[in-house]
Every structure is written in structure tokens, then in C-alpha cells.
């Protein structure tokens, strides 16, 4: 089954994020908590509020902060180039699934070789959050996906209309930020992405 990852935007309060995710979590597979401005305590409290709202911890992934992910018992951690090495996380915290953000095929093969459980690759299409960077495109996604055995999740400028194209080029899922969490109707948006993913599986 293709996976729908939702990544927090850094533009919403903890309570706002919790209220939205409580409504949409049935349609998504994972929520990445990427909130660099929050303290560890704010992050822990948000995870507790999400859990109390019925969101399974198995759907939660913490960005960068391995200690918080371990402390709260969530599904996993998403690492960046500033984070602890994959092999060290696997050794110290074997219960955590480890994802990595990658931008090149060489990065992908290196981190997959270290034991990353999944890779997030992009940005694939033009996106307002990265106005001065050339998008990678689905051709490069296909190249990366063929180089590694780990699942590759596409990110950047993805909407329900191009999900099928992303899936056709080897992705195992998509990661969405503003397209869901900042939508006028987040629940409807999540449903549309889920439908597009399901439709892509039928086509393939």
C-alpha cells in the first residue's frame, strides 16, 4: 500500500495542528513533526495531545530529535544532514524506524546502505517553499528509486493531480505539507490525496 506522509508546516500552533490531525489521521499513514522552533517539551506535549486525541503513536515521526522520538515511543525519526548518523540511531534505538531526507542518488544509496528504513526525496515539482531551487523532476525520482531497495517517498509540489505520475516513477508514497494542513478543508484534502494514491495502485 502506498503511503501518505503529512509534514507539519511550522506555521501552526500545537493546538491547531492537533485539532486538524485528529480529524484526518484515518486518511494518512504518518505525521512528521517538523517544528524546529518548538522546545523539546512543546514537542513532547504535542505528541501527548495527539495520542489523547486518538492519533496512534505508530503514525507519528519526529524530525531530527532522536531523543524525543525515543522518549515518547513514536514510530520513528526523520533525519537530516545535521542529525545523528543512521547507523548510530539503529544501534542505540533499534525500536525506531529511521527515515532520511535525500536530494541526490548518491545520498540515497549511502543512507540506504547505512540502514535507513525509508527515504524522502525531492523537491519534485515547483513549490512556493523553495522558489529559487530547480525541481528534481520525476525522472530523477525514478533513477533514485531504482538505486535503492528502501522505499522512496516523493516530496515537493505534489497535488492530487500529479500523485499518479509520482507513483508511476517508482515512489512508494508522497509527503505533503501545506497541501493538507494549510488547506481550507484539510479533511477533504487528505481524502483526495488518499483517493489519488489508491487509484494509482489500481492503475499500476
Image (tube, helix red, strand yellow):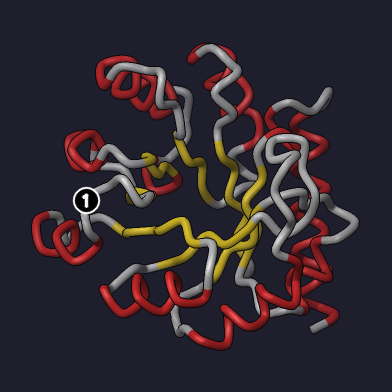
- In this rendering, the answer to whether 120 lies above or below 53 is below
Q: Residues within 10 Å of mark 1 (few under 14, many from 20)?
A: few
User: Is 196 left or right of 41, judged from the image as shown?
Assistant: right
Quadrant holding the C terminus: bottom right
- In this rendering, the answer to whether 192 lies above or below 91 is above
Residue 45 in picture, x, y percent from top left = 32, 17
Residue 148 in picture, x, y percent from top left = 47, 83
Quadrant holding the N terminus: bottom right
Instruction: Identify the residue position indicated by label 1 in the image.
Output: 84
Residue 33, picture quadrant: top left
Residue 177, picture quadrant: top right
Total numbered labels: 1
Q: Look at the numbered disc 1 and give the secondary structure of its residue.
A: loop
Which residue is painted at 65% across and 29% down in the image? Answer: 23
Name the foreground residue: 26 vs 111. 111
Which residue is painted at 17% across and 35% down in the image? Answer: 71
- In this rendering, the answer to whether 197 lies above or below 67 is below
Residue 188 in picture, x, y percent from top left = 82, 36
Q: Going by the picture, which residue comes out furthest to the left?
A: 92
Q: Going by the picture, which residue comes out furthest to the right?
A: 161
Q: Going by the picture, which residue comes out furthest to the front?
A: 132
Which residue is painted at 66% across and 45% down in the image? Answer: 176
User: Is 43 left or right of 143, judged from the image as shown?
Assistant: left
Which residue is painted at 47% across and 35% down in the image? Answer: 55
Residue 105 in picture, x, y percent from top left = 52, 76
Name the foreground residue: 110 vs 166. 110
User: Is 138 left or right of 4, judged from the image as shown?
Assistant: right
User: Is 162 left or right of 88, judged from the image as shown?
Assistant: right
Amino acid at each position: 500500500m502506498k503511503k501518505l506522509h503529512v509534514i507539519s508546516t511550522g506555521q501552526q500552533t500545537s493546538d491547531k495542528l492537533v485539532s486538524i490531525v485528529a480529524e484526518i489521521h484515518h486518511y494518512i499513514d504518518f505525521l512528521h513533526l517538523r517544528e524546529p522552533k518548538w522546545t523539546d517539551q512543546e514537542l513532547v506535549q504535542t505528541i501527548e495531545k495527539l495520542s489523547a486525541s486518538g492519533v496512534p503513536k505508530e503514525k507519528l515521526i519526529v524530525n531530527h530529535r532522536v531523543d524525543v522520538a525515543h522518549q515518547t515511543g513514536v514510530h520513528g525519526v526523520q533525519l537530516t544532514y545535521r542529525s545523528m548518523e543512521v547507523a548510530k540511531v539503529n544501534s542505540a534505538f533499534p525500536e525506531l524506524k529511521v527515515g532520511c531526507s535525500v536530494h541526490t542518488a548518491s545520498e540515497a544509496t549511502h543512507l540506504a546502505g547505512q540502514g535507513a528504513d525509508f527515504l524522502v526525496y525531492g523537491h519534485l515539482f515547483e513549490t512556493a517553499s523553495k522558489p529559487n531551487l530547480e525541481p528534481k523532476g520525476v525522472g530523477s525520482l525514478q533513477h533514485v528509486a531504482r538505486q535503492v531497495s528502501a522505499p522512496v517517498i516523493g516530496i515537493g509540489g505534489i497535488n492530487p493531480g500529479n500523485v499518479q505520475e509520482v507513483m508511476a516513477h517508482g515512489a512508494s508514497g508522497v509527503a505533503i505539507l501545506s497541501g493538507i494542513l494549510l488547506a481550507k478543508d484539510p479533511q477533504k484534502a487528505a481524502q483526495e490525496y488518499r483517493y489519488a494514491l489508491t487509484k494509482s495502485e489500481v492503475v499500476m
